[in-house]
Each structure stands twice: as C-alpha cells, then as structure tokens.
Amino acid sequence: MEIWSDTVILSRLQFALTSIFHMLWPVITTGLGIYLVIIEGLWLKTRNPDYYYHARFWAKLYVLNFGIGVASGLPMEFEFGTNWAPFSEATGDFFGSILGFEGAMAFMLEAGFLGIMLFGWNRVPPIIHYLATIMVAFGANLSTFWILVANSWMQTPSGGSLVEGKFIVQDYFQAILNPAMIDSVAHMFLATLETSLFVIGGISAWYILGQRGDRLTAFFGQSLKIALATLVVVAPLQVYIGHTSAEQVYQHQPSKLAAIEARWDTVAAGETAPWSMMALPNAKAETNDWELNIPQGLGYILEFKAELSEPVLGLKAFEPQDRPPMIGLIFYCFRIMAGIGFFFVGLMGLTVVQWLRGKLAAAHLGQQTWLLRAWVLAAPLGYVAVETGWTVREVGRQPWIVYGLIRTSDAASPLPASNVLVSLVLFTLVYSVLLVATLYFGSRILREGPNLDLPLPTGDRADLAATPGEFLPDQRPVETQN
C-alpha cells in the first residue's frame, strides 16, 4: 500500500515530526535550568559580577527555547485525541493522568516562576529570586520525569492488565515504577544536562575563538570551566546509565535488542557471540549481507564477560509481524548515540588534562585552537545523540505502541488519509517557520553577546554591607531588559 494513503503510517510520520522537533527545545531548558541554578548560587555566594552577567545572558537562551518548546509541544498533546484516539481510550486511566500531572504539576510550576526569574532581579529579595530560579529548573525537570514515566510504561507496561481492550490499573504505583522507569528517567535527565553543558561549552569556545577581547575571553573561559567541572561527573555517569538502560532492554524487550544488534539467530545461554560494529541488514533474506565484528564482543557489551548467562533472542525467534521495522535505522542510530557519548567522555578528559596543565588560563586559552574547535563541533552532537536515542527507543518498540499489549496499527484513529496528509504538510511548514525564527533570534542573542555593563542588582542592605566596595555609588536599582 502506498505510504500516502495509509492513515497509520501518516499518523506515525506526523507524531515523529512533532516529537523530533519539539524535543530539540526542552532538552536545553531542562539542562540549562540547572546551569542557571549553579550560576546564580555562585553569584549569591561570591558576589562576583561575572556570575550575574552569566545568569542574565544564558537566561535569554533559556526563555527562547522555552517559548518554542511550548509552541511545538502543545500539538503533541492534541494528537493523542485526534490521531491516536483508540490508544487514549484504552490507556487513558493511567496514561492520561500522567500527562495531566506533567501539565498541572510541572509545566505550571516552571511557567509560574519564569517571570520572576527573568524580570524580578530588582523586584524581589535575592533569596526569593534564587528560589524562583530553582523552581523553574525543578519544574522543567519534573516535566521530563512525568513524560518519561508515561513513555517507560509504554515500553514495559505494569500495574494492571488489558481487559476487553482497556487497560485497568490495579496498582498505580507499580505502573509508575515500571521496570524501565528509573533507568529511563536517569538516562534522559543526564542527556539533557550533558547536551546543555556541551552547548554552553561550544558557544563559549566559539566566542573565545573569535578573539573578541580579553574581557570576553575571560568571561567565556569561566563558563567553559563551569560546564567542564560539571561534565567531569555527568559524562562518565551517562555512559554507565546508558549501559544499565541496555541491560533493561536485554531483560524486558528482547525484540528491540535483536534489532539494535541486527542479530537474526538466537545465542544460547553459556555461548559467546561477536558484536557487530557495522552491518548491512537484509530483512528479506533474514541475514546481514555484510558485517564488521568484534569476536566475543556481545557478552562483554551486555554482561562484561564473554559467555552470556541468558539467551539473546534473534529476530528469527519472532514472527515477522512482531519484529521491529527498519532494522538498519535502529542499528546505526544506537551506534551513533553511543559513539557520541564516548566522544563526549574523551573530549571532557582531554580538556581536564589541559586545565591541569594550566592551558585554560585566560592568557593561554585562546591558543588552544584545536581543543576549542572540538568543543564547537560537540555543541550540536548532544541533539543528535538525543534524537537517535529516541529513534532507537520508539522505532525499536514497534509494532507495539504499548509493548506486548497494544499494536500501533490498532491504536490509530480511523481518519481519512488525506486529512492526516494535509495536517502533516501544515505541521511541516509551521515548524519550518518556527525553526528559522528560532535560529534567527538565537543568532541575534549570540551576536549581541553578554552585556557586561549591565547595572548590578542592589539586593537588600545586609547584602551590600556584607560586600563593601562591591557596588559602585551610581549603581541604583533599575530594572533592565533581559
């Protein structure tokens, strides 16, 4: 059947478009929110004006991403009712309430305190402003938590059973704490933070490479070091959590694991098997036309030993209609995601070595051309890792929308294909306009750079007395545009 006349395929394409585009923006707001908490905490502790200027500058990028994230995310909520009504009806008792928690609990918290964070520097006491920043970051990450709860339940459904086509919740907390939840939340939390930190580091490196003066070199050298100090923990931990997430797939989603590894034949317990670095899967022939293997590598990847303690089912163990589609896409997306993760660890390690050698001092930082270029290159790679990781997660779950319970083909609304095609085209046009607008305003923010002459907030009298000489006499309490 032609793709353009298949309602299910078109609905899947539309949701893929909206989710891929939307995901670009909250990835930054969740991680950048935490960075703003760190920066403002340093400002309150040290009263170093540079930290205040950092908070004001990076907040501009935060609010830009927040706005586009809201505009692009709302259509996804409506798609569950328009394109996926049978799914919503079948799972609404649990899935719908979780999305409700995300909107009422997390999004409202973030949006409610955002205005104070942006415009309250001279209108509320410093501690209240800092609390607002914390609440914004907490709300953004709470949103991620609830979304990952909902999605992980789709991966490993628990806490109830399907009765006459409707999921009946028997243990709500068991459904929330489904087998994939903890690893999923941790992996995505670290992914958003790691992506944000490399974006901050990449933008900082771009400014330093541009040789815009000693003051800006020192300023962005500072933000690069803060991002680096956080990545010392985040980057290696993300690789470890990525491994535990793979173990979860090994235990609970054998067909997805088979697709990730492009493995057609089952490997019995106690046996060894090679791990394919590259392959050319052939679904029709049920084999790989070409492979580049590491002998006994599969066991070390999954269990850190050569012999497997449990069998690894091959794709042939599943009926053709129960196998994930597009094996090559899943196979290579996983390797791109993992490769970027290890690249981040390597870049972080090399930069730490240069830091210990004193090469990140303001006097020498501009000379580290190769290192700074690597950071600029790394800035977009976090987005690539997140998108490819979600491709593995979602395409690898197919043909199930709720793994093992509800098929995607049974979950789509019976809409005319032409209607879905029109909305898909319109979404593509609107999102293209949003992308161009975001790039334009983002580039404008970067071209203008930080305002290092911005008057400092006065704070309360106790703060002023505690830091004599910190503020100049002519620095009066004025509210400036962010």
Image (cartoon, rainbow, N blue to C red):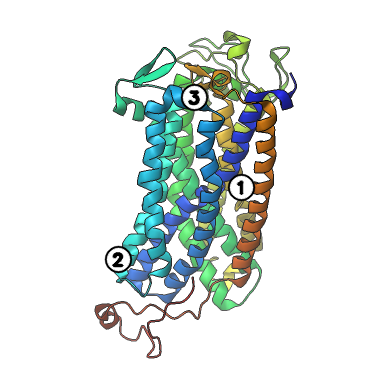
Image height of 339 relative to 11, above or below: below
Do the numbered discs 3 and 2 sit on residues whose CB atoms are within 8 Å?
no
Image spot of residue 203 (x, y percent): 59, 61
Three-letter code, disc 1: Leu
Q: Nearer the viewer, residue 310 or 219?
A: 219
Position of residue 260 in the picture relative to residue 402 (left or right) = right
Front: mark 3 or 2: 3
Task: Tell me if I can see residue 170 in this picture.
Answer: yes
Q: Nearer the viewer, residue 50 or 451?
A: 451
Do the numbered discs 2 and 1 sit on residues whose CB atoms are within 8 Å?
no
Secondary structure, mark 2, is helix
State the CA–CA distance, disc 2 to disc 1: 36 Å
Secondary structure, mark 1, is helix
Where residue 367 is drawn, which disc sits there?
none
Q: Residues within 10 Å of mark 3 (few under 14, many from 20)?
A: many
Considering only order in the chain, which callout, 1 or 2, is on the residue closer to the N terminus? 2
**Based on the displayed image, in which of its 4 quarters is residue 99 positioned?**
top left
Residue at 52 percent of width and 71 percent of height? 219
**Based on the displayed image, in which of its 4 quarters is residue 331 positioned?**
top right
Considering only order in the chain, which callout, 1 or 3, is on the residue closer to the N terminus? 3
Front: mark 2 or 1: 2
Three-letter code, disc 3: Phe
Q: Which residue is mark 1?
A: 381
State the CA–CA distance, disc 3 to disc 1: 33 Å
Task: Tell me if I can see residue 367 in this picture.
Answer: no
Q: Which residue is mark 3?
A: 87
State the CA–CA distance, disc 3 to disc 2: 43 Å
Secondary structure, mark 3, is helix
Q: Which residue is mark 2?
A: 128
Q: Residues within 10 Å of mark 1 (few under 14, many from 20)?
A: many
Image height of 481 relative to 172, above or below: below
